[in-house]
Each structure stands twice: as structure tokens, then as C-alpha cells.
Amino acid sequence: MNDYLARFIQLLVTPFDHLGSAWPILPIYTSLILGEMYKSRISFGHAVANGFVMLWAGSNWARRLSSASTMSYMFSSKALAWVVAGSCIALGIFTIVLGIRKKDKALCEILGHTRFSCYFLILFYPMQAGLLGWSWTSLTAVLIFALPAWFVIYLMGRVASRFMT
């Protein structure tokens, strides 16, 4: 479990070790902080906005991956990076359509939380940006700490919103 915790912390810290590479992730942190501080009620509009954030991040990652050489995909973990970028794009489109159609309120409440999309985008960023290599340890750490991190983000948002009112 210590290996997963160490990898989780490494995923959070690595973009800030290379300040030049931290700039693309700062809007995601801003979105997370403002989304948690000023949320009133999760709505279909929140789901559409989070879908656009996921779509933007996934297409940015796909653009970066497409500039790499074709042979590098066969002998490295670039295939997993493409799966993550494609999943991010697909989930973004799905969330946008779901929010526009206003059909499934329960699913929109999950996908409409900024902590859902931002958590994955922040933790996948070091691997997608090439700052860290893809590994099963990293992927497992992201999944293991998802619920505890979402709970901590929720508590911090509640505390921050109390100070704002």
C-alpha cells in the first residue's frame, strides 16, 4: 500500500517539479477549487461544463500523442495513453450529450461534480504529458485513492464554502 501512496503523491507533485509543464494543469486546479467553493446544486449545466473540460483535455492529449512517431506506439506504453485520451474524449462527449438531453439526473449528479473530472485529469496529466511513464502501479494508485480523495475534496469544499458565506 505504501508503493501506491508514494505513487499517488508523486503524481500530484511531479507537474510542479517542472514548472514549465505545470501551466496546462493550472486551469484544471482552478476549475476544481472554484467548482467546489461556489457550487450550489449540481445541475445538467454543470455536467455539460465538465464534459467540455474532459473533451478539451482529451483532445489536447490526443494532439500531443499524434505528434509522436508511429513506431513509438508499438514498443511503449503509448497505447495506454491513447486509450486514456480516447476515453476522456468519449466521456466528455457522453457527459455533454447527457447534460443537454436532461434525461438521467442521477448520472448527471456524478458527472456534474468537478471533483469527478478534475481528479482524473490532474492525476493522469503527468503520465499523459510524458513527465512520468505509464505503469499499472500509477493506474492502480489513481483508482485506489479516488474515493478518499473525492471525500477530502468534498470536505475542503464544504469548509471553504462556509467561509465564503
Image (spheres, grey):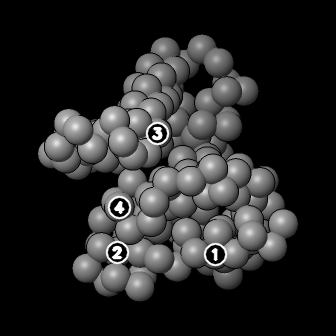
Q: Amino acid at mark 2?
A: Ala
How many angstroms separate mark 2 from mark 1 (CA)? 15 Å
**Labels 3 and 4: the sequence-earlier one:** 3
Q: Which residue is found at the position 52% from the left and 79% from the top?
A: 13
Of circles 1 and 3, the one toward us is: 3
**Labels 1 and 3: the sequence-earlier one:** 1
For mark 1, what is the residue? Answer: 9
Asked if the residue under mark 4 is in contact with the one under mark 3, i.e. CB atoms within 8 Å, the reply is no
**Labels 2 and 1: the sequence-earlier one:** 1
Q: Left of 124 or right of it: where is 138?
A: right
Of circles 2 and 3, the one toward us is: 3
Query: At numbered mark 1, what does the secondary structure look like: helix, strand or loop?
Result: helix
Q: Residue 12, image x and y in percent?
A: 55, 72
Residue 141, image quadrant: bottom right
Which part of the image, by quadrant, shows the N terminus?
A: bottom right
Above or below for 155 versus 41: below
For mark 3, what is the residue? Answer: 80
**Labels 1 and 4: the sequence-earlier one:** 1
Q: Nearer the viewer, residue 127 or 115?
A: 127
For mark 2, what is the residue? Answer: 22
Above or below for 164 versus 58: below
For mark 4, what is the residue? Answer: 130
**Labels 2 and 3: the sequence-earlier one:** 2
How many angstroms separate mark 1 from mark 3 (CA)? 21 Å
